[in-house]
Amino acid sequence: RSITVALPDLIVQSLRGPKSAAVGSGIAVTETIRNNAPVGAGASTTQYYFSSDTLLDGGDALIGSRSVSALGAKDRNSGSATVTIPPATPPGAYFILAVSDGASAVTEAAEGNNLRAKSINITP
């Protein structure tokens, strides 16, 4: 008989913010983190990035973060943070990326489902 150990699974269930913002401005973003697993998850940090696409890579700028308290099985935590659009950004179409457990503090059942993207138009 085998023993299966369940691990937490943190996802960004929703991400909201403005449709547009000026270069260098601070904007409020709101997200909901959900633990999709049947076991609890420890405290974590949601990290926000500014990106030219929907993929997180080394060229993306970390623009903010938010602490998320420990979550029970299937629990959610919603909160907001103010992030700053990088001042040297040329006007155009970009994305705000929210990454649950951005600092990798929680060992999860699936690490590849932690990102959600929201489009934003940057104006001069």
Image: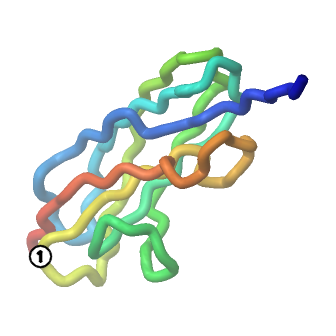
Q: The residue tagged with tag 1: helix, strand or loop?
A: strand
Residue 57 percent coordinates (x, y): 48, 75
Residue 113 percent coordinates (x, y): 49, 48
Residue 88 percent coordinates (x, y): 29, 83
Give the quarter of the image for residue 86.
bottom left
Residue 94 visible within the image: yes
- Image quadrant holding the N terminus, namely top right
88 in relation to 18, above or below: below
The extreme right residue here reads: 1
Determine whether, in the image, residue 121 is placed left or right of residue 58. left
Q: Residue at x 38, y 33 (%)?
A: 13
Q: Amino acid at mark 1?
A: Gly
Judge the density around disc 1: few (<14), some (14-19), many (≥20) Cα neighbours within 10 Å. few
Provide the residue designation for mark 1. 92
- Image quadrant holding the C terminus, namely bottom left
123 in relation to 41, above or below: below
Q: Observer-nearest residue: 107 or 58?
A: 107
Q: How many marks?
A: 1
In this picture the colour scheme is: rainbow
Residue 52 percent coordinates (x, y): 28, 75
Q: Residue at x 64, y 18 (%)?
A: 38
The extreme front residue here reads: 1
Residue 65 visible within the image: no
Q: Residue at x 14, y 68 (%)?
A: 122
Give the quarter of the image for residue 93.
bottom left
Q: Observer-nearest residue: 111 or 94?
A: 111
Q: Residue at x 64, y 16 (%)?
A: 72
Determine whether, in the image, residue 73 is placed left or right of residue 120. right
80 in relation to 116, above or below: above
